Structures are given as structure tokens and as C-alpha cells.
Image (spheres, rainbow, N blue to C red):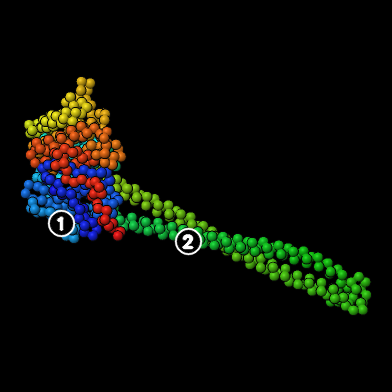
């Protein structure tokens, strides 16, 4: 798979594209801020990436669709993506045709007809990526995944901030999920690990897990058997405590005797219970409780009445005493009546001299009337007191009857409680017996299962060990580790040759790709020097180029299912100022080193005879004929990816 063109569409149907030549070195040169670096993001987006990395600004404001036309041996595939509203999308359009297929000149025919999963499947099928499952490392929380075009494309891009980065070698390697993905997929794409090896490895992993599980189950079953005697002893002691067995029953060293005793417990018949009697006892106890509450209520009422009558009697006694005192005081008037008229109580006679008075004394008459009234009231009070005393006596008699009834009720309640307790204790014992029988039944079943299960587990263990041994033999006969080592040897020779062509630091030594650490290093007498420990951006970029050119040389010559292109963004940045506008204006640049980079790219592409394509977006613009022949476009003098006259979406 190689790239034929990359295009963008405006909101009014405008079309701008850059054409590339398959099987050759393609150079897009130009000034900064013309959109060169965005081409890599557009290609990656069109080829199925969900996350949008295309810069926000002029491009996102003025573009409605992005397109990439790729070519396989006998067909082309046009992949278009609408400009997304959000930072992530899976909407896409796919058109498949022959080698004459071109991107439409307007955006009007573009319409979503697929998603990124379909894009992945279409590309994977045409790249002839086999069904290959990557299993995570032991103890890893990552999920296994199937290799597809998404992993293959990670070897086809080097963005501006990656190609001169000494900390990462591969595209998106610094992303947490991508780094282990590259490490897992690299052996497959190198051909060091085949689907057959992967299948054997998965079977071996599963067989080892099965064997481990069987060993755990065997240990658990043997532990069950070793603890059986203790459990049996505890069950028998519980049976003795409940009266199901006698104290003389002992297990001894005979497991069969212990099983017989457990069977005896299991067949123990508890005494039958008259449920009617239990129900009646509960009802009788409830009836007595209600009766007791009624008696106490009546007793409180009688006590209240006695207290009321007693209080009234005390108050009446105080009033009667006061009346008696007043009456005694008035009774002294009897001595002041005239003697001869004493009987009549004549009020016209002086009580001192018995002489007649000119008119009757009314005070004497009033006092005599008051005295008579007091006598009457005293007589009535004495009658009321007698009646109250009679009522109080009756109430006290009723209280005694109630107390007697309450004592009888308490005695009946005690008897009912004792009866219910006896019934409850019987029920509790029956429940304990039932629970014990359940434990005994479980123990008897467990014994049969464990004794038979241990032997079955041991047979399964022997089968599992045999399967593991056979799979290990198959795996060692075609060990992917040895295949990967041979691939690394071949790649390392290429990397060393390319590093020497670029005259990089340490190129006099042997350079090697590390598939575990995902880096490149060279080994000198003092030890290994990884990319992260090398100095100078020229060396960082140089070893990136050497490693990726070596990988693609291997992919092409070994016919591996990886796209046949490599996109490089700003590989000459190490030779120009950070804020370079146009590299052609920089007279201080190391043009010899720049020329060596592009000559190496040209030589590798030429050596592979049209089976490999390199696309470079860079500031450099050498005057050499071979360089100018490779230039596909020159974005200077106002030329850029997005023309100035394109309207934005708002307009």
C-alpha cells in the first residue's frame, strides 16, 4: 500500500490535493506555517485513526472533508473523512476501484458510508494481515488484541516531534497503550512470530493455566481429606450433647465406623410434637396477659376512688370541726335568756335583769337562728360521713377481691410460661437436631465427592502435564524468540550500514535495535549506548532514519504485511534554527549532512525497485537534479495547503 494523493475539500466544494509518485522518493518542500506537517495527520486520520490530531485553526475552519488515495497492486482505495465537530469520530467514506480511480474534484459526491472499523478491515484484508492474536504479558491488566492495519501503520509515520526525540523511536510510542502494542506486534510484522506459533503459544498458556488450576484443586481436596477426621469428631460430640448418641460412641481409627455413626445421626427420628398443644399454650398465655392487664386497670380505678373518698372525708371532717367550734361559741347565749321566759326565748326581756325592754332585741334573735342552723348542719354532716365510710369500706373490699384475682392471674401466667418454655426448649432442640443432620448430610456427600474427586483430579493432572510437555516441545522446535533474535541480527546490520552512511556518532561500532525497550543503541568497548544517552539532535534524527529505513527494507524484502510507505516530517530540523522560515536562506546550515540524509533515502528507495515509497515534508530544497526530480510541490511564494481565498465555515 502506497499513497497516491492527499486532499482537502472546502465548505463550498473547493478541492486542493497533493499528488505523490508510488515507489519513489517524494519531497514536499516549503516555508514554515504552510501546512506541510498537517499532511501526516491527515493521512493518519483518513487511514482510520479515531482521535483527531489535525491542527485547529485555518485548516479546521476552512476544510469540510479530508481525503487520502492509496494504491495496492491492482486497485486503489479512496478514504475520506468529514471534518469532525469533536476531538474524536469514527465516520468515514470508502470507495474501491481500479488503478484509474481518482479523488473527486468536488466534495458534492462525498457521503459517509462506513466507519473506522470498516476502514481497518478493508486495509487489513488488502495488506493480507493474518489472524494473529497478541496476548498480554503475564500479570498485565491489558486485554489481548488482534493485529490489524492500525498496528501496521505505527511503523509508517515519524512526526516532527518524534523524529528528533531521543526518548521515543516509534510513532506514538510515548502513549501508554501504544508502547506495549508496538512491542507485542513487532515480532509478527518482522515475521519472527507466525500465527501458528501464536496459536501454539496460546494453547501452551491455556494448558499451563489448566495445570495450575488442577494442582490447586488437588491441594484443596487433600486438605479436605486431612481435616475429615476432625470434622467427624466435632459432629459426633454435638450429637452426644443433643442426646442422639451415647458417650460410649467413639470413632477410633476406623473411618467406616465414623461413617456408620454419621449415618445413624442422619436417620435419627425426633419425637413428634403436638402442634395444637403448642398453639393452645401460646393462646392461653396471651389470654392471661390480657386478663392481668384488665385486673390492673380495675385495681387502678378502685384505688383512685378510695383516694377520692378519703380526701373528701378529710375535707368534710375539717369543715365539721369548724362548725362545731362555732356552735360551741354560740351555745353560750343560752345562759343569757330570762329565767322566767327561758322556754319561750322571749327577745323583749333583758337577759341580765329580767326587766322588760321597750322593744325586742333583734341581735338575740339572729344569734339564736344561727345557732339553730348550725345544729342542723352538724347533724347532716354526721350522716354524710357515715355514708362515705360505708362506701370506702365497700371499695376496700372490692380491692381485696381484685388483688386476689391478680395473684391468681400471676400464678397462672407463671404456669403458662413454664409450659411454653418447655415447648420452646423442645422446639430449639429439634432445630439443633435438624441443623446437625444437615451438617452430617453435607459431610457424607463431601466425603464421597472428595474421595472420588481426588482420583479424577490426579488423572486430569497427568493428562495436563502431558499436554504441556507436548506443546512446549512444539513451541521450542519453532521458538519465536530465536526467530526474533535472527531478525534483530539482520536489522542491526542494516542500521549499522545506514548509520555509517550518515556518519553518525558511534557508527564505527555495531548498532542494534532493541525490541523490548523499543530503542536503538550501539555497543562500544565501554558498554551499550542507547539513543537516550546519545548527544546531538543530528544523531537522534539519524538513528531514527536508519532504524525505520532498515525496518521497511526488511518488511519489503520479507514480504511482510506492512504499508510500503514512510512519511517523515522535518528530518533536517537538526541543522536549522528552531524558528526557521525557509531553510534555503540559511547559509550556516550543514548542507553536507542534509544531502547525506536525502541521498540515503533515495538510495534505499531505489534499491527496493519501486516497492517502497518515502514522503518527506521539509524546509530543505537542494539544487541537485535528483533532489528536484523528487520534489512533488514547493510551497513558497504564497502557496500553501489551504488557499487564502477559501472561505471559513462561518462565512
**Disc number at residue 294?**
2
What quarter of the picture does the N terminus occupy? top left
Task: Locate residue 149, reporting x and y percent.
Answer: 15, 45
Whether residue 460 can be seen here: no
- Depth check, front residue: 119 or 632: 632
The residue shown at (78%, 67%) is: 327
For label 2, the SS is: helix
Mark 1, Cα crowd under 10 Å, few <14 / some 14-19 / many 20+, is: some
For label 1, the SS is: loop
**Image height of 144 relative to 370, above or below:** above
The residue shown at (23%, 29%) is: 530
Q: Is residue 481 left or right of residue 41?
A: left
- Depth check, front residue: 598 or 475: 598
Q: Is residue 420 left or right of residue 10?
A: right
The residue shown at (7%, 39%) is: 609
Q: Is residue 323 left or right of residue 620?
A: right
Q: Which residue is mark 1?
A: 104
Task: Locate residue 238, reporting x and y percent.
Answer: 28, 40
- Depth check, front residue: 446 or 574: 574
Between disc 1 and disc 2, whose residue precedes?
Answer: 1
Task: Locate residue 186, reporting x and y percent.
Answer: 16, 37
Amino acid at each position: 500500500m502506497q499513497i497516491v494523493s492527499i486532499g482537502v475539500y472546502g465548505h463550498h466544494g473547493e478541492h486542493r490535493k497533493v499528488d505523490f509518485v508510488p515507489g519513489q522518493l517524494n519531497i514536499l518542500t516549503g516555508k514554515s506555517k504552510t501546512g506541510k506537517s498537517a499532511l501526516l495527520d491527515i493521512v493518519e486520520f483518513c487511514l482510520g485513526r479515531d482521535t483527531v490530531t489535525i491542527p485547529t485553526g485555518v485548516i479546521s475552519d476552512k476544510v469540510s472533508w479530508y481525503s487520502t488515495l492509496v494504491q495496492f497492486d491492482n486497485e486503489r482505495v479512496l478514504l475520506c473523512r468529514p471534518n469532525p465537530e469533536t476531538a474524536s469520530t469514527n465516520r468515514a467514506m470508502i470507495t474501491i476501484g481500479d488503478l484509474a480511480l481518482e479523488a473527486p474534484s468536488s466534495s458534492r459526491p462525498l457521503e459517509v458510508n462506513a466507519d473506522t472499523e470498516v476502514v481497518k478491515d478493508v486495509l487489513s484484508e488488502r495488506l493480507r494481515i493474518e489472524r494473529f492474536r497478541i496476548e498480554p504479558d503475564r500479570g498485565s491488566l491489558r486485554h489481548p488484541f488482534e493485529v490489524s492495519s492500525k498496528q501496521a501503520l505505527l511503523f509508517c509515520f515519524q512526526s516532527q516531534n518524534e523524529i528528533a526525540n531521543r526518548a521515543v523511536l516509534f510513532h506514538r510510542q510515548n502513549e501508554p497503550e501504544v508502547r506495549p502494542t508496538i512491542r507485542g506486534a513487532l515480532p509478527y510484522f518482522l515475521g519472527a512470530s507466525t500465527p501458528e506459533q501464536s496459536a501454539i503459544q496460546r494453547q501452551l498458556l491455556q494448558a499451563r493455566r489448566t495445570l495450575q488450576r488442577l494442582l490447586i484443586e488437588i491441594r484443596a481436596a487433600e486438605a479436605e481429606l486431612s481435616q475429615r477426621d476432625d470434622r467427624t469428631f466435632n459432629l459426633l460430640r454435638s450429637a452426644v450433647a443433643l442426646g442422639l448418641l451415647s458417650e460410649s460412641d467413639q470413632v477410633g481409627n476406623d473411618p467406616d465406623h465414623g461413617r456408620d455413626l454419621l449415618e445413624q445421626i442422619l436417620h435419627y427420628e425426633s419425637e413428634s410434637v403436638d402442634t395444637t398443644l403448642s398453639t393452645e399454650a401460646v393462646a392461653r398465655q396471651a389470654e392471661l396477659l390480657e386478663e392481668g392487664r384488665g385486673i390492673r386497670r380495675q385495681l387502678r380505678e378502685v384505688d383512685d376512688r378510695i383516694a377520692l373518698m378519703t380526701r373528701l372525708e378529710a375535707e368534710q371532717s375539717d369543715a365539721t370541726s369548724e362548725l362545731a367550734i362555732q356552735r360551741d361559741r354560740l351555745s353560750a347565749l343560752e345562759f343569757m335568756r330570762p329565767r322566767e321566759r327561758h322556754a319561750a326565748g322571749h327577745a323583749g326581756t333583758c337577759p341580765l335583769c329580767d326587766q322588760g325592754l321597750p322593744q325586742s332585741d333583734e341581735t338575740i334573735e339572729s344569734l339564736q337562728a344561727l345557732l339553730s342552723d348550725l345544729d342542723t348542719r352538724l347533724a347532716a354532716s354526721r350522716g354524710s360521713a357515715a355514708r362515705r365510710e360505708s362506701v370506702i369500706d365497700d371499695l376496700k373490699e372490692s380491692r381485696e377481691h381484685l388483688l386476689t384475682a391478680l395473684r391468681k392471674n400471676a400464678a397462672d401466667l407463671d404456669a403458662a410460661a413454664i409450659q411454653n418454655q418447655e415447648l420452646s426448649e423442645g422446639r430449639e432442640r429439634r432445630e439443633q437436631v435438624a441443623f446437625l443432620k444437615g451438617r452430617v448430610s453435607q459431610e457424607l456427600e463431601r466425603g464421597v465427592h472428595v474421595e472420588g474427586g481426588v482420583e479424577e483430579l490426579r488423572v486430569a493432572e497427568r493428562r495436563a502435564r502431558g499436554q504441556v510437555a507436548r506443546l512446549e516441545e512444539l513451541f521450542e522446535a519453532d521458538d519465536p524468540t530465536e526467530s526474533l533474535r535472527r531478525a534483530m541480527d539482520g536489522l542491526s546490520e542494516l542500521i549499522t550500514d545506514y548509520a555509517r552512511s550518515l556518519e553518525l556518532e558511534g557508527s564505527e561500532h555495531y548498532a542494534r535495535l532493541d525490541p523490548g525497550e523499543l530503542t536503538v543503541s550501539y555497543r562500544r568497548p565501554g558498554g551499550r549506548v542507547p539513543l537516550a544517552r546519545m548527544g546531538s539532535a543530528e544523531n537522534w534524527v539519524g538513528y531514527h532514519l536508519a532504524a525505520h529505513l532498515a525496518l521497511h527494507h526488511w518488511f519489503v524484502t520479507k514480504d511482510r504485511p506492512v504499508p510500503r510507505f514512510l512519511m517523515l516530517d522535518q528530518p533536517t530540523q537538526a541543522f536549522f534554527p528552531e524558528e526557521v522560515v525557509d531553510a534555503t536562506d540559511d547559509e550556516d546550515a550543514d548542507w553536507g549532512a542534509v544531502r547525506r540524509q536525502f541521498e540515503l533515502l533515495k538510495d534505499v528507495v531505489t534499491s527496493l525497485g519501486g516497492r517502497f515509497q518515502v514522503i518527506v515534508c521539509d524546509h530543505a530544497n537542494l539544487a541537485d537534479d535528483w533532489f528536484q526530480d523528487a520534489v512533488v510541490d514547493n510551497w513558497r511564494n504564497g502557496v500553501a495547503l489551504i488557499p487564502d481565498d477559501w472561505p471559513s465555515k462561518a462565512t
